[in-house]
Amino acid sequence: MLEGWIIFIASVAYLGLLFAIAFWGDKRADAGRSIINNPYIYALSMAVYCTSWTFYGSVGRAATSGLDFLPIYLGPTLVLVLWPFVLERMVRISAENRITSIADFIASRYGKSLYLGGIVTVIAVFGILPYIALQLKAVSTSFTVLIQYPEIVMPRHLGRVPLFQDTAFFVALIMALFAILFGTRHIDASEHHEGMVIAIAFESVIKLAAFLAVGAYVTFGLFDGFGDLFARANAVAEVSQLFHQASVGGYAQWSTLLVLSMFAIVCLPRQFQVAVVENVNPDHVRKAAWLFPLYLILINVFVLPIAIGGLLQFPDRGVDADTFVLTVAMANHQEGLALFAYIGGLSAATGMLIVATIALSTMVCNDLVVPVLLRMRSFQARFTGDLTAFLLFVRRSAILFVLLLAYTYMRLIGESYALVTIGLVSFAAAAQFAPALLGGIFWKGGTRAGAMTGLLLGTVMWLYTLVLPSFARSGWLSMDFIELGPFGIEVLKPYALFGMSGIDHLSHSLFWSMLVNIGGFIWVSLLSKPSELELLQAGEFVQKLDSPGAAPVTAWRGSASVGELQDVLRRFLGDDRAVAAFAEFARRHDMNLDHHAEAVPALVSFAERQLAGVIGAASAQAMVASVTKGEVVSTEDLMRILDETSQVIEYSHELEEKSRALEETTAELRAANVRLQELDRLKDNFITTVGHEFRTPLTSIRAAGEILSDNPALPNAERDRFYSIVVAETQRLTRLIDQLLDLSKMEAGSIEWSMAPLDLGATIDAAVAAASPLAQAEGVRLGAELPGGLPRVYADRDRLIQVLVNLISNAVKFCDPADGRVHITARRNGGTVVVDVIDNGPGVAPGERERIFERFQQGGSGETLTNKPKGTGLGLAICREIVERFGGKVWVEPAAERGSVFRFTLPALEAAPAA
Amino acid sequence: MNHSVLVVEDDDNIVLSLTFLLEKSGFKTRVVGDGNAALNEMRKAKPDVVLLDVMLPERDGFSVCEEIRANSAWSDVHVIMLTAKGRDADREKGLAAGADEFITKPFSTRDLVAKVKAAIGMAAG
């Protein structure tokens, strides 16, 4: 029944179904109804970890080494259960930076380095080749074995087959077609392949179901459950010993496998692809942290039973243990089960092939081909239009190239190794990414030079201690290389470097490669100085844990027009997507994007991120830089930015100061303005007041004049009275004019001062003498009481007398009308002399003591000038002007009993005499 | 005849001229120097005319005028205000306070007498 054509049709039908599922997934994604947006699909897609190596190889390993197959599954379980945040963090970083692959991630972390991306890609391609070869080998082996049914013949006994009869070759071609159809249907800035993911998840279900079916058949069909199975196994010494020894390879190998598989779950390009790049929601990681380990447990449950069943079934060891899953069913003529097992193995292999080649092709395209092409001017000149078709071509070629390379590897090397051993070579290669990858997200100090050094050293060590010996063992190199060391140098023996022997090859290789890798990474990182872009990227990657929602920092300097940017995007994303992306940006930022306007920094980094999703961070950065006038920030630039920033800060401080000063000035101006308005009002008042002061005597003069003129027959006494009014009021006017002129001259500073040292006592006497007639006329007793030895003062004599007379006549005017007394005293007080003019009048109200020294503000309450003593209202103002001119002060105080003391001080010329 | 005039003015020399002029014209003249005294004097005997200076000690002529106008018993008293400020604003303020006439210092003696006479309906001259 299991004719070749049936197997072939079943295979094709299965692949067709897979394609239909993928197509449906893509359609759903295009329609915006994603079906992969749930943690179950995510966890199942991560199960692409279980390849044909698991499906066939685990049983093979269990049959030869007992429980040694387990660490490969314990590693990922440990990582996911204990440290899911590591994965979660990578997912978040990748989502924000539009990371397309592990090469892109590492390049991006270390300053969007083109070289680093390229190096990672090359290592990945050559590191993963054995692994891909392994899948090809598994598919072709299983096909070859199954097709011999009912015979059970191992392919190695069939001899070498020509290329065009080799099923592996056709498998490679079919897989290439499949990967091309799935992975490169279109170029997408988000680099999500939803169809691929759902197909992979489906495959994970199929391979698990197939494996469980075979396991259940062996355990419950061939045997009576686990108890019977292990009891029967124990009866056979060769079989039972497998499970009674702890580990064939020893603890070193266990640890090595554990470490390798822990790294593999994030470092293998395909795992990075499904777990990080294809992740649509970081929250899924938490649930996958137990779902995925659960899957691993399920698929491992029947490994030992199948291995035991196989060993018991084929006691002569004529059947390769790697084929037990298939051959046990075949030997028992379970055709359907055998076909199902074959399909399960096929799905395990195709799942890996598809994801791995898509991941690698993305890396080859984004991190190898595009950067190189972007550097070539001839290319730049030729391809100025839409590049999406070209990019797809590159990716498709890369897929075909990788598969054919893997096939070649299989033809050259594959025959001589068991599946597991081949796979581990790839694991060891992928592990080289771990220091740069994990160091990159946890250690800010990691630099591009450090990462590059570590990667290169580790890879060289991997090549030397693992790959070259495998060539030797396959006969491509002399075995002397292994046994005697290169050129017979023993210390350099690849399996016993520097004399390290006694551990298995893999542990040996891992030890040395990790030593130089981690050592180189840390050492060079500490020595080298990162560029500013590296610092920025490092900050962004490492800080992701602290502030998951923070927007990416982009140090962008340089300018490009919106149109130019969109043109670049158009070339790599195609018209529709580029326009849609810009529209989306405009909508989200609520702005109109004028094609000729200069792009805001946010738009530049947005465009770069969109581009990064298609061609990787490093190329995207180079591409955007090619249209923007600015270059990537250099140290000088950054220093200048910092400098400018500090200048701006300083400047803003200055501005603050200035605005504060301005505010002060404004306040001063406002105050001055208020004062000015006040002065203006005062001037108005002054003029009005002066007018009033003139009008009052003029009224008397005019009235008296008209009365005299209209009444020629007035009696003499009355006539004289009116004449004297005219005279007195005329004098008052004259005095007023004199004082006004005096005052204005004093204020203008245009008065002549005859300053001289004066005998104060003599000057006071002179003033008293001048005022005596007035006092006598008013019946006021006037007296001075001056101590001897008054110091001299420096003043203008006439002006000082003017002050004194003014104060005395004021005092006389306001004296008690019945018993008027005015008294003058003078005394020295330190460096000054104090002169008091004391009256016994009504005193000055406290509120008026200052006011009366202003012009036209005479004593008495009420409104201005309501009281009209016989003064002009200018006397005290003039006194103050004069006294202040002499360096003294004048004010009024209430007298001890009643009345006022008008007191002024003058600086004494002589120092106080010694006592 | 014997109409009475209350002169409210604090400048002695002006008072001298005013009393001479008014008495010569046959008015019975009383003189006070401030606003409160003026109101007291009015309560004693209602004058026909009040010659009210604006600039007075204690309270100004405007408020005195307002108080006079507030008392209905004095509604027939004629108030003539005297001001040395000569500004329209003062004039309006005085008229608003209820003054009948406004005379600016320095004034013409004939004009003053004529205005007092006119106020009480006497023919000029």
Image: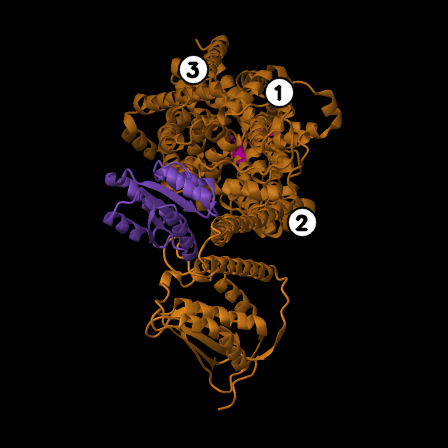
Which of marks 1 and 3 precedes in the sequence?
3
How dense is the environment of label 1, judged by Cα within 10 Å: few (below 14), some, or many (20 and up)? many
Task: Specify the segment rendered in magenta.
Answer: A412-426
Give the percent coordinates (x, y) of residue A395. 61, 22
Q: Quadrant of the C terminus of chain B?
A: top left
Q: Are marks 3 and 2 on the same chain?
A: yes
Q: Please indicate, yes or no, whether residue A191 appears anywhere in the rendered image.
A: no
SS type, badge 2 = loop
Alpha carbon distance from label 1 to label 2:
57 Å
- Asked if the stretch drawn in magenta spans residue A486, the answer is no
Indicate the colouring scheme.
by chain
User: Which sits in the foreground, A698 or A391?
Assistant: A698
In this picture, is A64 found above or below A657?
above
Give the percent coordinates (x, y) of residue A224. 28, 25
Q: Tell me which amino acid carries mark 2.
A: Ile
Which of marks 2 and 1 precedes in the sequence?
2
Alpha carbon distance from label 3 to label 1:
48 Å
Q: Quadrant of the N terminus of chain B?
A: top left
Q: In the rendered structure, find residue A706 and report the number of the disc placed on it.
A: none
Q: Colour of chain A?
A: orange
Q: Tell me which amino acid carries mark 1.
A: Arg
Q: Are marks 1 and 2 on the same chain?
A: yes
Residue under label 1:
A570
Residue under label 3:
A339
Q: Are marks 3 and 1 on the same chain?
A: yes
User: Which sits in the foreground, A590 or B46?
Assistant: B46
- Circle 3 or circle 1, nearest the eye: 1
| Quadrant assignment, res A386 | top right
Give the overall secondary structure of the magenta segment: helix
Residue under label 2:
A489
Give the percent coordinates (x, y) of residue A789. 51, 87
